[in-house]
Image: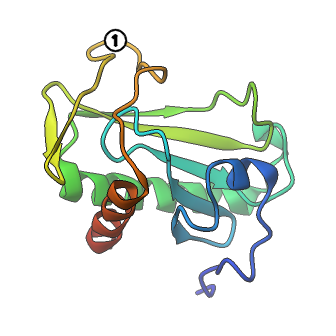
Amino acid sequence: MNKPATPESTSLNATMRKFGAPQTIIRQYQYWSVMLRPAQATLGALVLAAHEPAEAFSQLSPASFTELHTITGHIESALTKAFQYDKINYLMLMMVDPDVHFHVIPRYAQPRQFADMEFIDAGWPTMPNLGQINKTDAAINQRIMNYIQSCWS
């Protein structure tokens, strides 16, 4: 089994840095990093970023695709345990940030409570509304990260 990647062993691409890495990294793998999305469109919104220097999904190695299968299982398990989402969306937009990455958006039919805050899914039941965010600060985001990490298998 491969040793998990660490912030020291993984070079952070521009997209990862834009989304706050290394501070926002919840879990690192050999080919991918799972990060908390600083702008919480929904409770537990994440960014899943590839480590390989690729600006097209097809440029990733077969090993990266294999690992992606494992990671999505871990993400879904942790977010289910943490927040009991109703649906989950993986959005690969890459319009502004060119490195291969997904926005992982847990979806909620009803508001969720966390850290004495109410989190709304403004787009439910249609497409996620990434322009409507739940206003959090660094302390709340750290609590969300810690909680997701505690739910990770």
Q: Is residue 50 left or right of residue 139?
A: right
**Image quadrant for the C terminus?**
bottom left
Tag 1: amino acid: Thr
- Furthest-top residue in this view: 126
- Residue 90: horizontal and vertical position, in percent? 49, 35
Instruction: Say which residue label 1 marks.
Output: 126
74 or 151, which lies in front?
151
Q: Is residue 98 above or below residue 124?
A: below
Q: Residue at x 86, y 54 (%)?
A: 53
Which color scheme is applied? Answer: rainbow
Q: Is residue 139 left or right of residue 39?
A: left
Q: Is residue 19 left or right of residue 86?
A: right
- Residue 96: horizontal and vertical position, in percent? 76, 28
**Image quadrant for the N terminus?**
bottom right
Q: Quadrant of residue 147?
A: bottom left
Q: Quadrant of residue 91?
A: top right
- Badge 1: how crowded within 10 Å, few (<14), some, or many (20+)? few
Q: Residue at x 72, y 31 (%)?
A: 94
Q: Residue at x 57, y 50 (%)?
A: 48
Q: Residue at x 27, y 17 (%)?
A: 124
- Residue 21: horizontal and vertical position, in percent? 64, 61
Q: Quadrant of residue 45?
A: top left
124 or 114, which lies in front?
114
